[in-house]
Image (cartoon, rainbow, N blue to C red):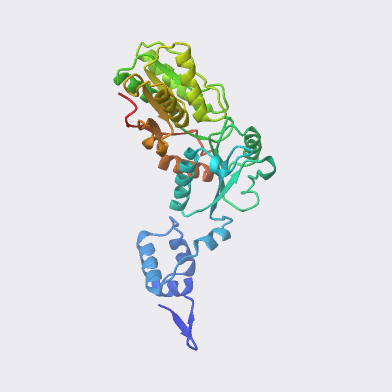
Amino acid sequence: MSNSLNGAPRRVTSIDVAERAGVSQSTVSRALSGSETITEATRRRVEQAAQELGYHVNARAAGLRRGETGTIAIVVIGRAGQGAAAINPFYYSMLGSTCAAAAERGYEALVSFQAEPEELFGHYVARRQADGVVVIGTATNQPAWDYFRECAAQSDSIAFWGSPFDNATWVRSDNRDGGRIAVERLVKGGANSIHFVGDTHCSQRQFSERYEGYRAAMKAGSLEVHEPLVGEGEDRVSQGRNAIATLVEKGADFDGLFFACDAMALGALEELASRQIAVPGKVSVIGFDGLGSGEFSAPPLTTVEPDFAMAGKLLIDTALAKEGEKPERRVPVRLVERASVG
């Protein structure tokens, strides 16, 4: 419904809603903004009047008046010298869930892919371009993480996934529980000589936590705990291939493998196939990350998957939380059963 003057439609305002509902203009503003000072009966009356008149709140304009932008900045860190296409697909899954979580809270997402030192930027909140910042991506770009650690020292509105440091507000998978889940499933499938593959001394803190979960589960099952196996290579896939080559060439006994990430596990499956080592006939394999591509490997890869929707929500909630409301946050994980485990 609209009013008109000389035949031209007049925009409905909060004054019109106030007159229709029989309340003050300030009551309309508070009722439609969700203020707890307004009774439920009054809120319903105002909402009904607004609906009848076709009045809609401009949430972005209201936010700007309160000093808010209505935007979340999401930075995806890649490797220097490589384009966005080379970024681990895991981070694209995380990006999607974070954008979805932002939308659920009524925020727009401002996404930036950053890798080179000269293009790094994280002061979105200080420059009033965003109300919070989420940073995700490869832990191998040390200059980028050094830069964002400095940004975090100047702002409480940054949340990290994949950070190689602990002295900032981060959200992570429940990696230790993931290690336990993987070992218990391998044992259930008949494995007892189980190795962990992943560099626990690299910048990726999650790897060491996953190994801790592996070690605790192996001890709980009275099984021999092996030192982490590190496969050399420029990328995770080649590291997985080379890890298998190392095990085979040194004559190691193994019938179960838990990889710190899916990309390494996928490389390992290729190497095992080339050496005619049957999976899961001779050895069972489990990865970690929940990559969709694992569904199409040969055989399809069993993996430990974080709750991506929960991860996105916690990242957004953490970036927007007030000071003192940011505990360390863990995302639950689950086993995705496929055919690489007996």
Q: Residue at x 53, y 60 (%)?
A: 60
* Residue pictured at 51% horizontal, 37% vertical: 88
Vertical side of 2 occupied by 228: above or below = above
Task: Name the residue at the right extreme.
Answer: 118
Near-viewer residue (61 or 303): 303
- Residue 264 percent across, percent down from the top left: 47, 28
Q: State the image coordinates of residue 243 (x, y, percent, origin top left).
A: 49, 21
Where is residue 216? Give x, y as percent: 41, 17
Q: From the viewer's perspective, tell me whether residue 225 is left or right of residue 151.
A: left
Q: Is residue 122 left or right of residue 245?
A: right
Quarter of the figure that contains the N terminus: bottom left
Can residue 228 be seen in the rendering of this structure? Answer: no
Residue 69 location (% of width, % of height): 57, 55
Q: Residue at x 46, y 46 (%)?
A: 96
Q: Left or right: where does residue 147 sit relative to residue 105?
A: right
Please tell me in which quadrant of the rendered image residue 34 appears.
Answer: bottom left
Name the residue located 65 percent from the left edge and 49 percent from the top edge. Answer: 126
From the viewer's side, name the closer residue of 258 and 299: 299
Compared to residue 98, the image places residue 284 above or below, namely above
